[in-house]
Image (cartoon, coloured by chain):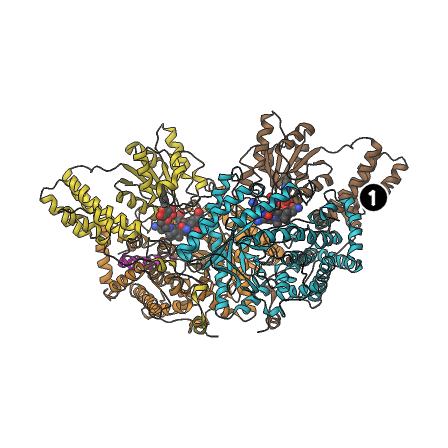
Chain colours: A cyan, B yellow, C orange, D brown
């Protein structure tokens, strides 16, 4: 497996929304990262639709058709539908097959009739449960691969997944503010598990006209981000969440190293780091994902995006239409603004405005500003061959970025943020420089404390 | 930085596409359409009457009808073979996307003008497919949707009783007693007025009355809300109203059927979310 | 009454979001149009809350408190809450009093604790019904003024209203594509009624620390816009809707002429025209109002805004929080982007990007692009003293703008749009140049056709 | 155009305000807080035990407890006068905003370690305020919210039975039989898994069982959904769980009361929307 030891982008200033060094071509005349931003719409199936295959198929049809109708009604040149599978879909690959088929047929109809560029991203669920049969070779594990294949075979433009390797340990660490557990969970275990999953996913996709898209550290860095919450919450320190995010860059990169080509999945707030390193197009979410959650970087996360997503919304009716209509319009109009900027040559200005709007809103935003994301990327590739060391380097760099901003009086921290940052950086600096030693340490420490954690799941 | 300079650089196709322009068909004269030709009467005075409706000419419609009545053409025939045929042709063109709402409204005005003239001679209301009562919920001043519903119902051959807007609940219940309607349509544009619907149903039930279905629609109304009480069906587009009424009339559909088969009955995809 | 016969802005390029020639100061340290854009949040009370005063008061408290919480949680520097009254509130001025009071107390608490700039806009409902007791001197009419006073006396920062004069006639005209009826309804009747209403509203407000804000032609131009719908709808021609919007500029200006000082109300898509003429700050809505409706100018409408609104949303729960939280975050983040542009001196570029994103999406957008809005403003002030002539001039100018764009092959029209535009312009050109003659004509024609229309309501 | 140049021009106060920094109080040592001082025991070995919990030191907690047990201090006293007092102090600081979740989790770990040690000597489970059963809905892998709930319940002196995630409906029902809990908490993060809640209630009722209340919370769960079936109350924040349990225990509140008085019971504003 190829590991990244050099940056594909040579300068952070070369990164901008709608452009990736390595654009992706999909069927239905869609290109990602090829000079225009594609809006994405994602809708969570309504309660009860999980009861039967028919219910789920009908949900998928309705969501897709509504999105198509609104797209032509407001004049969007392109859009992507993502379907995040629920447990039942992945666990029953025939559900996946039928759902994907009805969605791809619907999209194709509009593509034929209006010449509108459309795209379908299928995201099978990672239904493995570490404490039940482990992560490797279980029934669940096999079902995931069957579901990936069912997606690819039935017309999905691309496939993504949110793998959960290392989550048992990082969850423990996030809830307790334990930086070492977070580093081990994300940097080591997460990376190991991704390699296991992604080699197989890429192989499956290559058999079809379907692109292996990407992964996200939702299970870990996003858990930290959601626990961190708003400015006045007190569950997880925002500086620690920022470090977790930086580490997630090192982890989620593994998908690309295994052959994923993008767009990397929307909820991967670490994606700008990976774009900087690898040049693949990315999906991101922010101010048009308020339906799903509140982040502190709603504009900043658009700066270098290629696919702009609403994350996820209840499937129901607003005064302005059904939610697939309403939220596609939201992401569609923002993408239109970005595309206007590209067309008029002002994309870098808009990118910088997006970035500066949030850069100092929160340390989590700060480290993902594209220039800082680039710096974290550089720290990662410097230790590119070693997943542990590169995740550690990412965290240390993120810490340095925050400290510099504090020193120059641009970023202000609370005591909780300040203390937990110092604590984490001290620990990280003192860690062994040998991956093996760190791993052994951690296995010893965390197998005892965390009942779900099973080293065998990582062939350790 | 100059705005014009920006503008000149843009390839609009990456920003906004006017699909309406792209899909537009060629212009035709109304009576050139084959289906219209087939539906228009060939013999006079019916053809002229139908054409005056088709051409949305209220004055011509009135004049042609008056002349026919003077010629002792039975008013029922004028209505059925002239006015209604013209309106059928209008509906055909609307459904094909050649005609638009204003065409329907104006043609409808012409048709109604003619019908009124015929009814004067008849001495009573002319026979329609059936009676539908339309109202806007109590406390709600928004009435355009309701006006459209009324117009579409009439264009579809139903007698639509227009109760206006901000209609007190008891007046609606009284209308049920008075007209025993085939179908009822209620419109509410606000969350705080759509609550009139379940109250109306409740009163109707209390009085031991029944309506095959009450179509409830309008801006803020949600399907899940409408389906939380009985006797109702969620109405999406105003032009669905006659189709729903038709389904009740011809196929004896109940409100339960209408809910389940809405999409088939109105003959097009309707966004569903629950 | 002073009529505008000159433009306050001397050049359309001087107009930009966050800045108005005549900024408005309100209590709680809020300035409107004074160099920053204020996000607005508006939530429709939940079904059932209309049953009792307690229910409505509790809704108002909850909406306001949720908005406050989210604002501090994501770091918004300022925001405005608008409460659009329902029938029961206006019809029972004691409801208005209590609702306004609980909202202003809540806002003040946060202002005191966090120093956050807050603002409360109360919008009593125009509950008059032309066909029942007419528009003047009815019980309903009196209740409106009592409700305005109850708002002003209980802490509202400003008061707005959506007056409905002329609606009976314009409704008829819009549904039938009758340009003359639209001109009469909006230009003549609407303007007459506004004068009647606004002189009184301004007098009431001046007694308190409460600003008379503005009106909107929701009843007329928005009805046309909503009937016009999306690109593929066939209810109302988009060119005719564009002319109606231009006329609305001439009509809604009357509020300012009577002493309203802004921000003009959000759903007045004609507001850029009035800002160009009069220099008052405006509220607008667009891409963050998709919850309420779909327009074809989601970005363009932000170009010269001062208060950025979500229009209105159901009061309920999203995954990302309650709707007051979620949608304030949406408008708040967009306002933050605009404020970043202002701070970095890039506001004109962002303004132009907003504008160009939608300028050729639809004729309705085209005529409201700030340069074109300015042109329509010029047409209006040229005939500034005569409400009829200035509305007609506005429509003719809008028609000219569309035709120029068509000729230069930037705007493409459908046959329906083309035909109805030609039809309308022909009619308008042939109209009498004497207001009285036109009015007499119309009274004769439309009293017969429109049963609700009562000339006495306009003292005609 | 240079990004740095832009940045240097900005007055952040018009873009984003870090209210958390603005409202932050001065740093203090935990035991300097007056309320903490009042709640900490003054006599040994309880003070040391309580302090080791307060300082989130699991090893010290264990060591201190072991030493006390060796000194024949009754385990019940160690728990009530030492470990729980330490946790009370932690709760005080959390509620004041000086302590944060990790502090609670770690202090909780220390407390649990000590309790386990005492229970070894006791030979049985120690007395708690009451038993609460916590689970994640069937089909749902998201368990952090549930973990927090469990932790807060334990910190509040309740015995929380942690059933884990993706818990089959029948297992939940069996747990009701087995533990006859005072309160139950269910967590679901997805629209398609929260449907387990009404099913569970249904089964419980079928078996003729009862639970005073089932708190249902988690990401995608909505209040209106939770209130559409009986026996349930919508749970907002994890730290509300012990307060709800307390209200059931002390004030005999039912699920109906909890719904109505939620905000008063948890002692803070909670966004309402219906
Ligand atoms: C124009 C308008 C007005 C005009 C009304 C003009 C008129 N003649 O109706 C005026 C200015 C008077 C007005 C006033 C107010 N309005 Co208003 N208004 C609107 C607006 C912008 C458009 C409404 C419209 O005409 N739509 C076009 C028609 C054709 O649509 P429709 O009626 O829904 O009908 C369609 C379908 O629903 C269907 N249909 C309808 N009924 C039925 C029935 C059946 C059986 C079937 C099959 C189909 C069907 O057919 C039509 C399509 O084909 C809406 C926005 C919106 N999103 O709808 C707000 C809106 C309805 N108004 C709103 C509000 C709040 C008000 C005011 C209270 C504001 C205020 N405080 O001043 C006042 C009302 C005061 C009072 N008396 O109580 C809110 C309601 C929010 C809520 N609480 O739920 C809305 C949603 C706007 C918003 N803020 O988002 N308004
Ligand atoms: C992290 C995360 C994951 C992680 C989970 C890690 C973990 N250990 O739990 C992973 C990656 C595994 C994951 C997977 C998936 N996820 Co996920 N995930 C999230 C995320 C980002 C954060 C969840 C979280 O931990 N929040 C923090 C905790 C603390 O919050 P909480 O549990 O809600 O608890 C709080 C309160 O609710 C309360 N509470 C909870 N219970 C109770 C009970 C009582 C009594 C009380 C008083 C209070 C209370 O206490 C806490 C606050 O104090 C959410 C986004 C979101 N908005 O929530 C999506 C989300 C839940 N996931 C979602 C989806 C779709 C999935 C997948 C299906 C995606 C896929 N196809 O791959 C898979 C699941 C696959 C499967 N097996 O079925 C969707 C669900 C949408 C829906 N259908 O409704 C969400 C909402 C994201 C989205 N797209 O918007 N996910």
Q: Residue A355: where, in percent of width, then height?
A: 59, 64
Is residue B178 something that shows in the picture?
yes
Quarter of the image where one finds residue A407: bottom right
Quarter of the image where one finds residue B122: top left
B133 horizontally vs D156: left or right: left
Residue A348 among magenta residues: no
Extreme residue toward the left, this view: B71
Q: Observer-nearest residue: C246 or A376?
A: A376
Residue C182 among magenta residues: yes
Residue at 26% in and 40% down = B158
D193 horizontally vs A316: left or right: right
The majority secondary structure of the magenta stretch comes to: helix
Q: Residue C348: where, in percent of width, then height?
A: 49, 70
Q: How many labels were placed on the picture? A: 1
Q: Observer-nearest residue: A204 or A125?
A: A204
The residue indicated by pointer 1 is D61
Q: Residue A383: where, in percent of width, then height?
A: 72, 63
Q: Residue D112: where, in percent of width, then height?
A: 78, 40
Q: Observer-nearest residue: C452 or A386?
A: A386
Which span of residues is magenta-colored? Answer: C175-197
The 10 Å Cα crowd at callout 1, few under 14, some 14 to 19, many 20 or more, is: many
């Amino acid at each position: 497996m190829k590991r990244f030891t050099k940056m594909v982008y040579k300068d952070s200033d070369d990164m901008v929304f709608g452009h990736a060094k390595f654009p992706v071509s999909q069927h239905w005349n869609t290109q990602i990262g090829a000079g225009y931003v594609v809006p994405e719409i994602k809708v969570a199936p309504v309660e009860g639709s999980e009861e039967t295959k028919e219910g789920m198929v009908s949900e998928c049809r309705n969501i897709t058709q509504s999105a198509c109708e609104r797209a032509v009604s407001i004049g969007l040149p392109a859009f992507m539908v993502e379907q995040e599978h629920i447990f039942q879909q992945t666990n029953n690959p025939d559900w996946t097959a039928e759902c994907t088929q009805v969605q791809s047929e619907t999209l194709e109809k509009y593509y034929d009739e209006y010449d509108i560029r459309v795209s379908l991203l299928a995201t099978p669920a990672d239904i493995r449960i570490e404490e039940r049969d482990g992560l490797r070779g279980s029934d669940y594990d096999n079902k995931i691969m069957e579901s990936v294949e069912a997606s690819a075979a039935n017309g999905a433009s691309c496939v993504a997944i949110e793998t959960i390797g290392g989550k048992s340990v990082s969850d423990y660490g996030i809830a307790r503010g334990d930086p070492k557990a977070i580093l081990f969970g994300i940097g080591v275990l997460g990376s190991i598990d991704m390699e296991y999953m992604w080699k197989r996913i890429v192989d499956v996709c290559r058999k079809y006209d379907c692109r292996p898209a990407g992964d996200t550290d939702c299970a870990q860095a996003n858990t930290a981000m959601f626990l961190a919450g708003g400015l006045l919450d007190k569950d997880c320190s925002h500086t620690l969440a920022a470090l977790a995010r930086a580490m997630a860059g090192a982890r989620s990169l593994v998908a690309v190293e295994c052959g994923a080509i993008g767009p990397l999945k929307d909820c991967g707030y670490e994606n700008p780091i990976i774009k900087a390193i690898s040049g693949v197009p990315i999906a991101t979410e922010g101010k048009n994902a308020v339906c799903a959650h509140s982040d502190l970087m709603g504009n900043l996360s658009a700066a270098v995006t290629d696919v702009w997503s609403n994350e996820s919304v209840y499937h129901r009716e607003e005064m302005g239409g059904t939610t697939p209509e309403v939220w596609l319009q939201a992401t569609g109009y923002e993408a239109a603004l970005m595309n206007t900027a590209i067309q008029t040559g002002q994309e870098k200005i808009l990118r910088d405005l997006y970035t500066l709007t949030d850069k100092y809103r929160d340390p989590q935003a700060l480290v993902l500003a594209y220039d800082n994301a680039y710096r974290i990327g550089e720290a990662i590739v410097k230790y590119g061959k070693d997943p542990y060391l590169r995740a550690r380097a990412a965290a240390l760099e993120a810490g340095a970025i925050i400290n510099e901003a504090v020193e120059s009086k641009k970023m202000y921290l609370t005591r909780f943020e300040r203390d937990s940052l110092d604590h984490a950086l001290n620990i990280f600096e003192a860690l062994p420089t040998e991956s093996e030693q760190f791993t052994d340490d951690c296995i010893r420490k965390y197998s005892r404390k965390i009942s779900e954690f099973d080293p065998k799941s990582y062939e350790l | 930085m100059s705005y014009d300079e920006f503008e000149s650089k843009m390839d609009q196709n990456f920003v906004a596409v006017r699909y309406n322009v792209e899909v537009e068909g060629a212009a035709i004269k109304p009576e050139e359409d084959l289906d219209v030709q087939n539906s228009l009467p060939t013999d006079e005075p019916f053809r002229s009457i139908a054409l005056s409706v088709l051409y949305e000419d209220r004055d011509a419609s009135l004049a042609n009808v008056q002349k026919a009545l003077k010629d002792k053409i039975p008013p029922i025939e004028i209505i059925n073979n002239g006015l209604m045929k013209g309106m059928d042709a209008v509906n055909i063109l609307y459904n094909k996307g050649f005609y638009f709402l204003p065409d329907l409204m104006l043609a409808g005005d012409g048709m109604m003008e003619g019908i009124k003239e015929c009814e004067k001679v008849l001495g009573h209301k002319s026979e329609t497919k059936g009676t539908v009562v339309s109202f806007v919920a109590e406390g709600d001043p928004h009435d355009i949707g309701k006006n459209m519903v009324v117009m579409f119902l009439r264009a579809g051959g139903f007698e639509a009783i227009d109760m206006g807007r901000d209609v007190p609940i008891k007046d609606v219940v009284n209308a049920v007693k008075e007209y025993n309607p085939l179908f009822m349509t209620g419109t509410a544009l606000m969350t705080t007025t759509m609550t009139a619907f379940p109250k109306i149903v409740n009163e109707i039930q209390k009085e031991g009355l029944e309506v095959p279905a009450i179509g409830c629609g309008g801006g803020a109304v949600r399907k899940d809300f409408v389906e939380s009480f009985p006797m109702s069906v969620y109405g999406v587009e105003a032009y669905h109203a006659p189709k729903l009424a038709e389904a009740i009339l011809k196929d004896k559909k109940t409100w339960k059927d209408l809910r389940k088969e809405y999409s088939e009955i109105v003959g097009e995809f309707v966004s569903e979310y629950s």
